[in-house]
């Protein structure tokens, strides 16, 4: 794999040089005011990226999976019921975690390629007169299928049913790349990680808790030690952690938030949408289809591309790595071997995206698919030429 080439997996993403340098720092005392100069600006920056005025932000040395566990273990008790749709690998894994924690999961089976069924949620929540359902799980951006779901619609479903359940949102592959409105959407726990939109290495679980979620932590009975938000909050008050933090990554997160906010969030989202539209133009020119069922659920951070029946899509990923030194994403779960994925999030520009499109095209032609060499690149070029970006910044 050539380190000269950008990666086109949907995370971890390309790391800008300035963020690599921010993470590369001398050892400091992580129980000192000096660490507080990293910790508190990083938390404030994340809160702004979440578009929240009230969220308590917690940053654990973990991954998005640790963020899921933080949400569950701090707010729920064994035997509680949660509502979740299974429409991809990551919603499936979160459901599995719930079950391992002794929670009852009411599962709405949903086609892989479809968004969350907010109307079905409303029916179920309206029928739950005893309010047995304590939380609703929602995957904002299903990385395995390239599907974006409407979180505002899930909130409307809860409100229409008059249901008090908490709303937990997996925003691992959306937050800091796609519009996310924690307060406006009434999200109670937002989960993300350092390795996607924040453009850092994997290693930080980043979660935001609403005041309602913080209230739920007072009565939750699931066991928690490493992910206890109260222990973390006590540490924060003293410029510290309850254990040793990943100081370099925290400094990188502080700088990442500054970079995103300097670019301005709406510009970040517009850049991701434009790059994604170019990729989608290429897919159409190839005569292929996305796993995502319709335009309203197209993800702006990852495209899962279906290959013809009988063709093993994983061969494209293997061939790209072996011949061209470029990384794409394989299909996962129900779509393994049926799709390959192009990640287009984080530190990326139009020009970088074109190199990924060109590589995917070469691989498909090499492997005998009926693709016209140059067709996808030309389609993306036409889109990018006609939808010019503002000056490509370092965050791009």
Image (spheres, grey):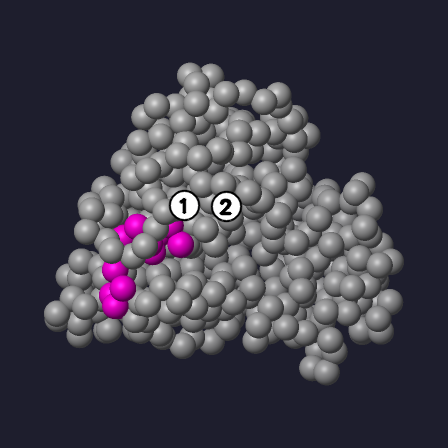
Outermost residue toward the top in this view: 33
Outermost residue toward the bottom in this view: 310
- Mark 2 to mark 1 CA distance (whole Å): 10 Å
- State yes or no: residue 76 in magenta: yes
Q: Position of residue 99 (x, y in %)?
A: 37, 69
* Residue marked by disc 1: 226
Q: Do residues under tags 2 and 1 come within 8 Å of each other at their CB atoms?
A: yes
Q: Which residue is more in the foreground, 226 or 326? A: 226
Residue in the picture at 84% in, 71% down: 367
Answer with mark 2 or mark 1, whichever residue precedes in sequence: 2
Instruction: Give the magenta-colored segment's residue range.
Output: 69-81
Would you say residue 71 is visible in this rendering? yes
Numbered disc 2: secondary structure: loop
Residue in the picture at 68% in, 52% down: 8
Residue in the picture at 77% in, 69% down: 315
Q: Which residue is more in the foreground, 145 or 40? A: 40
Left or right: 158, with 4 as reference point: left
Q: Quadrant of the C terminus?
A: top right
Left or right: 283, with 366 as reference point: left
- State yes or no: residue 140 in magenta: no
């Amino acid at each position: 794999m050539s380190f000269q080439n950008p990666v086109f997996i949907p995370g971890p993403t390309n790391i800008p040089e300035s963020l690599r340098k921010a993470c590369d720092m001398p050892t400091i005392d992580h129980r000192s005011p000096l660490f507080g100069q990293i910790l508190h600006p990083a938390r404030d920056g994340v809160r702004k990226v979440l578009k929240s005025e009230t969220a308590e932000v917690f940053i654990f040395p973990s991954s998005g999976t640790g963020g899921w566990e933080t949400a569950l273990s701090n707010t729920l008790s064994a035997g509680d019921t949660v509502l979740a749709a299974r429409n991809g690998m990551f919603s499936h894994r979160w459901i599995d975690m719930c079950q391992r924690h002794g929670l009852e999961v009411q599962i709405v089976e949903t086609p892989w390629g479809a968004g969350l069924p907010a109307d079905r949620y409303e029916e179920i929540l309206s029928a739950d007169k005893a309010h047995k359902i304590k939380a609703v799980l929602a995957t904002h951006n299903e990385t395995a299928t390239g599907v974006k779901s409407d979180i505002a619609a899930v909130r409307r479903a809860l409100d229409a049913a008059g249901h008090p359940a908490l709303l937990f949102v997996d925003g691992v592959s959306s937050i800091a790349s796609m519009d996310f409105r924690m307060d406006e959407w009434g999200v109670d726990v937002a989960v993300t990680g350092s390795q996607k939109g924040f453009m850092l290495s994997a290693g930080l679980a980043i979660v935001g808790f609403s005041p309602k979620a913080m209230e739920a932590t007072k009565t939750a009975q699931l066991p928690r030690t490493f992910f206890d938000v109260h222990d973390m909050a006590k540490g924060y008050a003293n410029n510290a952690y309850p254990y040793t933090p990943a100081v370099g990554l925290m400094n990188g997160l502080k700088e990442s938030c500054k970079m995103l906010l300097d670019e301005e969030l709406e510009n970040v989202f517009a850049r991701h949408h434009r790059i994604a539209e170019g990729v989608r133009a290429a897919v159409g020119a190839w005569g292929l289809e996305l796993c995502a069922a319709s335009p309203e659920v197209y993800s702006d951070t990852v495209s899962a591309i279906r290959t013809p029946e009988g063709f093993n899509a994983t061969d494209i990923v293997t061939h790209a790595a072996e011949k061209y030194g470029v990384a794409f994403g394989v299909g996962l779960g129900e779509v393994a071997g049926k799709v390959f994925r192009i990640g287009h999030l984080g530190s990326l520009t139009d020009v970088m995206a074109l190199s990924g499109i060109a590589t995917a095209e070469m691989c498909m032609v090499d492997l005998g698919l009926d693709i016209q060499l140059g067709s996808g690149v030309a389609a993306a070029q036409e889109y990018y030429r006609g939808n010019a970006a503002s000056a490509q910044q370092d965050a791009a």
